[in-house]
Image (cartoon, rainbow, N blue to C red):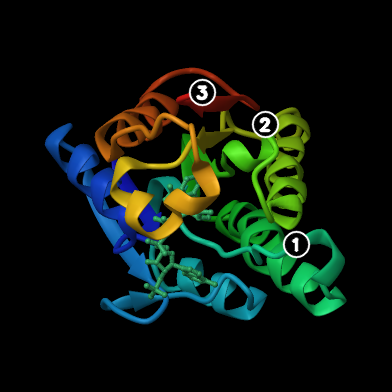
Amino acid sequence: MKIVLIGANGTIGREVQRKLREAGHEVVPVGRSSGELRVNLEDRASVAALFRDLGAFDAVAVAGGEVAFKPLASLTTEDLVFSFRSKGIGQIHVVQEALPYIRDGGSFTLISGVTGREPIRDGAAAAAVSRAVEGFAMAAASELPRGLRVNVISPTVLAESMPAYGAYFAGHEPVSGEKVANAYLKAIEGRMNGDTIAVGA
Ligand SMILES: NC(=O)c1ccc[n+]([C@@H]2O[C@H](COP(=O)([O-])OP(=O)(O)OC[C@H]3O[C@@H](n4cnc5c(N)ncnc54)[C@H](OP(=O)(O)O)[C@@H]3O)[C@@H](O)[C@H]2O)c1
């Protein structure tokens, strides 16, 4: 399959790229600030332009989008708008804008995170956005035409990210990037639709 991967050069994206290529897929890597193909999830016109210029493809996977990690009392409106616009609405726009171009039977694989399943310190905005993405997929699945599917990967913290995020995840058992990448492969090659695939506790 030809798979468009947004956030391809990030911690998760690199693992997903490797896994999909190992499985024999053609990966089209897309970055925000690096690589030949670029997109800004915060800008719908940029998302639309990406798919308009790409030609046909079989799947889109997202491993990017940002949220603000801050104590509840100091989360500003701007923090919340930023979080929803980047990781929330950004991923919804990916599905909407790719829809005219994706081949029949194709799939969308989005990203949420353990923040939507367990309370993490400073994670209220992340939790709200994760659940929003999962809710979107659950409902949008029933509207997708042509045998298309949409699913969400919800990993706990990656072992590779512990140096950066470890302080927020005391007592959590990290998962390997390999395991998270397998979940993407499962969502792309499997038949699930509207599901959230939890990876790790
Ligand atoms: N790492 C974890 O432990 C973990 C666990 C659960 C969930 N997640 C979620 O998984 C996603 C990826 O995490 P990660 O750790 O792989 O992050 P990362 O290493 O920071 O990589 C994120 C990638 O997404 C791209 N990106 C970020 N904002 C973007 C935007 N507005 N438009 C287009 N591309 C954008 C970045 O591009 P540039 O490098 O060009 O900026 C980067 O390639 C995030 O949503 C995160 O919340 C991560």
Q: Secondary structure at mark 3?
A: loop
Percent of width and height locating residue 43: 63, 78
Q: Secondary structure at mark 1?
A: loop
Q: Is residue 135 left or right of residue 105?
A: right
Give how far apart the Cα atoms at labels 1 and 3 are. 23 Å
Percent of width and height locating residue 10: 34, 61
Q: What amino acid is at disc 2?
A: Arg
Around disc 3, counting alpha carbons within 10 Å, would you say few (fewer than 14), some (14 to 19), or many (20 or more)? some
Around disc 1, counting alpha carbons within 10 Å, would you say few (fewer than 14), some (14 to 19), or many (20 or more)? few
Q: Is residue 201 left or right of residue 15?
A: right
Residue at x 53%, y 76% (from the top left corner): 40
- Figure quadrant of the N terminus: top left
Q: Quadrant of ligand 1?
A: bottom left
Residue 186 vertical position relative to residue 83 in the rendered view, above or below: above
Who comes first in sequence, dot 2 or dot 3? 2
Who comes first in sequence, dot 1 or dot 3? 1
Residue 175 sits in quarter: top left
Who comes first in sequence, dot 1 or dot 2? 1
Percent of width and height locating residue 158: 37, 42
120, 178: nearer the viewer: 120
Give how far apart the Cα atoms at labels 2 and 3 are. 9 Å
**Disc ID at residue 201:** 3
154, 193: nearer the viewer: 154
Residue at x 33%, y 75% (from the top left corner): 37
**Disc ID at residue 117:** 2
Which of label 1 and label 2 is nearer to you?
Answer: 1
Residue 173 vertical position relative to residue 11 in the rendered view, above or below: above
**Disc ID at residue 3:** none
Around disc 2, counting alpha carbons within 10 Å, would you say few (fewer than 14), some (14 to 19), or many (20 or more)? some
Mark 1 lies on residue: 71
Residue 89 vertical position relative to residue 147 in the rendered view, above or below: below
Percent of width and height locating residue 62: 47, 52
